[in-house]
Amino acid sequence: MRLTAVSLELDSPLRTASAEILEREGWLVGLEPDADDVPARGVGEAMPLPGWTESAATCEAALTTADDDGFDAGSGAASDARIPDADTPAARHGVTLARADAIARADDRRLTDHLAESVGFPAPSPATSVPVNATVGEGSTAAATRAASRAVEDGYEALKLKAGSRPLADDLDRVRAVRREVGPAVEIRVDANGAWDRGTARRALDAMADIGVSYVEQPLPASDLKGHVDLRNELPIDVALDESVREFGVDRVLESGAADVIIYKPMVLGGVDRTVEAARRARDAGVEPIVTTTIDGAVARTAAVHAAAAIPEVRPCGLATGSLLRTDLVADPAPVERGAIDVPEGPGIAGDAFDDRVFE
């Protein structure tokens, strides 16, 4: 197994609960037939994000141990829904993605076809594309309406507005202004990142239902699963969960009845295989899956597009994140065009587009 350290500069700082991140650091994973018991070359990406996955040091140790011990080709089975997997989901993502890429390349088919077949989803069409949402940050009302207008002009049919860092009245003013700007046909989602208490969340969701918001993501703190159940039962608007999935795991969230929509991040789940399997379980439970990223490099981001494309009639996903990077691994093989991303024809993730970064 080949490991290549990579560092990607962010276009603007990423603020998490514990730090301000200026760059994304991780590893590319390369597997080869002669050394790693795979049928072709495969490339994966392990891009840990502390607070969401293991630390960079823990990820590196897990990858190094896997390399030293030899890669077990059977270790990619997607049977466990817990998050994380042995505390190293980013490492697992990198290794199992490289294996899946190798298998799909050997079969001369796209990764999305391999993923759909693995969970019993119908085969995606040959010309598959994934609709994506544009994200509108927490700037002023004027800035939000300008950004929303530009996104709609660029072809986006779904917008996600960040909320929760200002008084609720100000957030509602922003959402109303964006709705007036883009009209009734554009889907508006609101992401509160767990900022509200139960009383504030009730007022927010009630008002946003009247505005025509399709769902509110993580209105309450991640730990308040019961509060999300109550919001979903009491108010006429969908509830989406993201951070709560990291906290409780896929099965617990589904069993609780706390969500109409679940946000799946492959790097956090531990792989695109687990993402598609979790999406199948969500659909079986009447819950809509949406795939997004942790601001990953081109390998993981393109693989996430394949995972989303494997889900039949997937709603707009949060995959338009390449623009958040100032530097990337390669030229983007799956760029956003008119609010959608075409799935690369392959084989595998994107043919040999990433090989030069890993193999010499």
Image: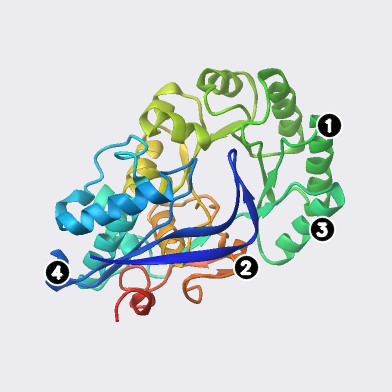
Q: Is mark 4 on a helix, strand or loop?
A: helix
Residue 175 seen in the figure: yes
- Alpha carbons under labels 3 and 1: distance apart: 20 Å
Please report whichever mark, 3 or 1, sits nearer to the chain's N-terminal start.
Answer: 3
As displayed, is residue 234 above or below residue 71?
A: above
From the viewer's side, name the closer residue of 18 and 242: 18
Instruction: From the top left corner, tell me how far across and down residue 26 is, in percent.
Output: 42, 59
Left/right of residue 197 with respect to residue 36 in the rendered view: right
Q: What element carries label 1?
A: helix
Please report whichever mark, 2 or 1, sits nearer to the chain's N-terminal start.
Answer: 1
- Alpha carbons under labels 1 and 4: distance apart: 60 Å
Which residue is tagged 2? 338
Instruction: From the top left corner, tell me how far across and down residue 356 is, in percent.
Output: 36, 80
Picture residue at 75% right of the left edge, 48% below the top: 184
Picture residue at 46% right of the left edge, 61% below the top: 301
Contact (Cβ within 8 Å) of mark 1 with mark 4: no
Which residue is tagged 3? 146
The nearer-to-camera label among 3 and 4 is 4
Which residue is tagged 1? 169
Left/right of residue 155 with respect to residue 36 in the rendered view: right
Picture residue at 50% right of the left edge, 77% below the top: 331
Picture residue at 23% right of the left edge, 51% below the top: 76
